[in-house]
Amino acid sequence: MDMINEGAQLARQMAERQDHRSRPGEYLTYRVGAEEYGIDIQKVQEIRSYEPPTRIANAPSFVKGVVNLRGVIVPIIDLRVKLGCDTAEYTEVTVVVVLNVCGRVVGAVVDSVSDVIDLDSSHIQPPPELSASDTGFITGIASLGDRMLILVDIESMLGGAEIGLSQGL
């Protein structure tokens, strides 16, 4: 009985991994710490310069607060803190990428935005198998010459109650 349940669970995990695998298309590239990441451009609404948000009491450390974006209250998540970077300095190139995540508008603070690139399937490799559950948002690795991009499913990375999306933050 346990072998059947384990087999079914493994099959579900493999199917989920297939569904979240990166597909060819346009990706916005950005830097967080020393690494370069890519997200599906269709999730991006706009890119804004960083402005200090209004803090929210008892929010997780990576939730910097909220801003009013043309009448919409937008939670601001610092991806540098969320991804465990050693430092998170705010400079003139620090930006907020405004995203549509799980049907909500969310701002993601990154060190800088690089460009928009068009990736075809020959550039995208599946992510390495890692046992750490907090890397499940990685959908692929793209190699472009000496440049390597970590492709992410931003909804898996930011979605859910942990950033208050389901509580209306």
Image (spheres, helix red, strand yellow):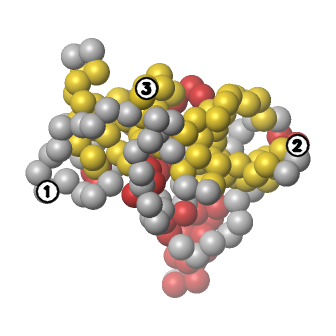
Closer to us: mark 2 or mark 1? 1
Residue at x 46% of width, y 66% of height: 86
Residue at label 1? 58
On-image quarter of the C terminus: top left
Residue at x 71% of width, y 66% of height: 128
Q: How would you rate the neighbour count of disc 1 (Cα within 10 Å): few for under 14, some for 14-19, many for 20 or more?
A: few
Q: Which mark is residue 90?
A: none
Whichever of callouts 3 and 2 sits on the residue coming sooner in the sequence is 3
Q: How would you rate the neighbour count of disc 3 (Cα within 10 Å): few for under 14, some for 14-19, many for 20 or more?
A: few
Is 77 positioned to the left or the right of 125 in the image?
Answer: left
Q: Position of residue 160 (x, y in %)?
A: 33, 49
Task: Spot the residue most to the bottom.
Answer: 2
Residue at label 2? 122
Amino acid carrying label 1: it is: Asn
Q: Position of residue 158 (x, y in %)?
A: 41, 47
> Is mark 3 in CB contact (under 8 Å) with mark 2?
no
Nearest the eye: 132 or 34: 34
Residue at label 3? 48
Helix, strand or loop at mark 2: helix
Whichever of callouts 1 and 3 sits on the residue coming sooner in the sequence is 3
Amino acid carrying label 3: it is: Arg
Closer to us: mark 3 or mark 2? 3
Q: Position of residue 56 (x, y in %)?
A: 15, 46
Q: Is residue 99 at least partly visible in the picture?
A: no
User: Compared to 118, does 128 lie above or below?
Assistant: below
